[in-house]
Image (cartoon, rainbow, N blue to C red):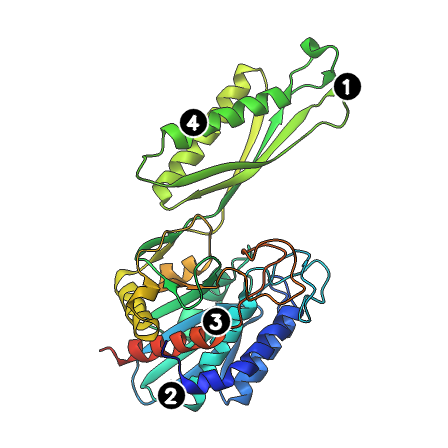
Amino acid sequence: MKLLDPIVEFAAQLQQIRRDIHAHPELCYEEIRTSELVAAKLTEWQIPIIRGLGITGIVGVIKRGSSQRAVGLRADMDALPMQELNTFAHTSTQNGKMHACGHDGHTAMLLGAAHYLATHASFDGTVYVIFQPAEEGGGGAKRMIADGLFEQCPMQAVFGMHNWPGVPLGQFGVRAGPMMASSNEFEVIVHGKGAHAAQPHKGIDPILVAIQIVQSWQSIVARNVSPVDSAVLSVTQIHSGSATNVIPDQAILIGTVRTFTPEVLDMIEANMHRIADHTAQAFDARVEFHFKRNYPALFNHAKESVLAAEVMRQIVGDDAVNSQIEPTMGAEDFAYMLQGKPGCYVFIGNGDGNHREQGHGLGPCNLHNASYDFNDQLLPLGATYWVRLAQHFLAQS
């Protein structure tokens, strides 16, 4: 593994930064303390900053030489509304808030790269280090773009990275094309007619209708989606009723749909709506159908994916880079940035969880798990990757 020595020497400070952020998690668009910490570090290293993009977003501008080439490196800063079960020294001090996805580590790794680029690196061009708020459902990437990210920071490409539990420490994963799925949610309200549970013939049972709808929806992925495509339709909540002897007036179905292509998504939404309407009509009920499209699918650009894989191999070797890693049905709002600019999003292995100190919770070290903790051993590796990626991109003609 070919890490940059100055970054390795700086790793203890990066760990301190990471654990400080972990202990003080902030939810989407509330990353005031985190944003101030990032701004203070960049200013300390004499890196000019841009504020006000995405409310709490920060962009550092590191420029050398006279080249007009520029590249963006992005990290997310927000935490999740979860109660942490860990009890180690840097556990969350905020009730009901936790860095359970590693954004604390992402921020620290990019700060490590920024410090090196500002104090050691020789390159010709501009590196924009983008610290983004509100990835966890707030669409912070989209907000930063709307606020003028790409106009104020003209770049030829933009890159992102996420830690990935289960992939061994020291390994990377990437693929060209679809990397992460779109995220969409639905709410369907089934309106029936309430009655005494002992006299069901006098009412219209919305629970029965809801059950029929859910069962029929399962045929959409099984029989309407091509076997070579991927899609998920999950009903995750059913709400109805308040008493054992009352047939309620309504039942509510809530859930998510994930796809890699808008065509498959269009088909699933249309079929869900049609099945819900017609099933309700068959039982003399009616439905309200609400479908919300959140994050689009994340597609890596081919040329930038090849570059990212080449940089990884130079750092960790051929055997530690999976350039055809399996895509995930999880979603990521970096997809918006890749819609606006060429680029690539990669996974860096977070290990199997053995890095956690005594005092971690009983659960696995998975993302969005109350016993998760970022692996600090990744900090110098991730920072080295960012530096080498920026240098190689800017050296291209």
**Residue matched to label 2:** 121
Q: Earlier in the sequence, mark 2 or mark 3?
A: 2
Please report contact status of discs 2 and 3: CB closer than 8 Å, yes or no: no
- Above-or-below relation of 15 to 308: below
Residue at figure coordinates x 65%, y 18% from the top left: 205
Residue at figure coordinates x 57%, y 68% from the top left: 55
Query: How far apart are the two marked residues, 3 and 4, measured between alpha carbons?
Result: 43 Å
Could you say which disc has been placed on residue 245 in the image? Answer: 1
- Above-or-below relation of 280 to 71: above
Amino acid bearing label 4: Ser
Q: Earlier in the sequence, mark 1 or mark 3?
A: 1
Amino acid bearing label 3: Leu
**Residue 262: which quarter of the image?**
top left
**Residue 43: which quarter of the image?**
bottom right
- Above-or-below relation of 95 to 151: above
Q: Earlier in the sequence, mark 2 or mark 4?
A: 2
